[in-house]
Image: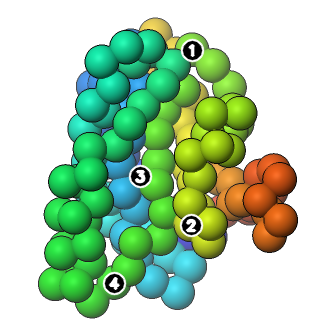
Amino acid sequence: MIVKDDALKHMRSHLEQAYPHEGCGVMLGSDGVITMVHRGTNIRQDRREDRFLLDPSDIVHAEKLARQKRVEIMGFYHSHPDHPARPSLTDREDAWEGRGRLGRRVDNGRMGDIGVFRLSEDGADFVQETFTIED
């Protein structure tokens, strides 16, 4: 997977602003390249510091944007405030098959590690993917 630097900057800004709660959104692009992100809203009312629920209207808006820009929804991103950027059991339970997940660690409001994962074919676990950042 390739993540365009501009998309990563928008993601970083969004997730740092969401701290100390989990931030979330949708990644858009094509041919394995994330070119843009659509900021989402975490509508969870409880445990927002370690759980998120992406507002369904954000997915609808991301789908419309994808059609307009002739790209597709490549996956989803969210932050793990003060925790490692690797999927949790909750992340696995909520994963969409065939869609990548990008997790970002945010410590004290500052972006940390990045982890990119995809649900395994049997749905039992996540497989870590390599990624590069491009201009």
Viewer-side residue, 5 vs 90: 90
Say which residue label 2 marks. 99
For the N terminus, the image quarter is bottom right
Visual colour scheme: rainbow
Say which residue label 3 marks. 8
Q: Position of residue 113 (x, y in %)?
A: 62, 34
Q: Position of residue 6 (x, y in %)?
A: 34, 59
Tag 3's secondary structure? Answer: helix
The residue positioned 42% from the left and 31% from the top of the image is 52
- Give the side of residue 68 with respect to residue 115, left or right: left
**Is tag 4's residue or tag 2's residue first in the polypeptide sequence?**
4
* Res. 48 image quadrant: top left
Say which residue label 1 marks. 82
For the C terminus, the image quarter is bottom left
Foreground label between 3 and 1: 1
Q: Position of residue 14 (x, y in %)?
A: 29, 37
The residue positioned 37% from the left and 57% from the top of the image is 26
Q: Position of residue 116 (x, y in %)?
A: 65, 53
Say which residue label 4 marks. 71
Viewer-side residue, 64 vs 80: 64
Give how far apart the Cα atoms at labels 4 and 2 are: 14 Å
Please tell me whether residue 31 is drawn above or below residue 118 in the rendered image. below
Neighbourhood count class around disc 3 (C-alpha, 10 Å): few under 14, some 14–19, many 20 upward: some
Q: Residue 4: in sight, yes or no?
A: no
**Is tag 2's residue or tag 1's residue first in the polypeptide sequence?**
1
Please tell me whether residue 55 is drawn above or below residue 130 in the rendered image. above
Give how far apart the Cα atoms at labels 4 and 3 are: 17 Å
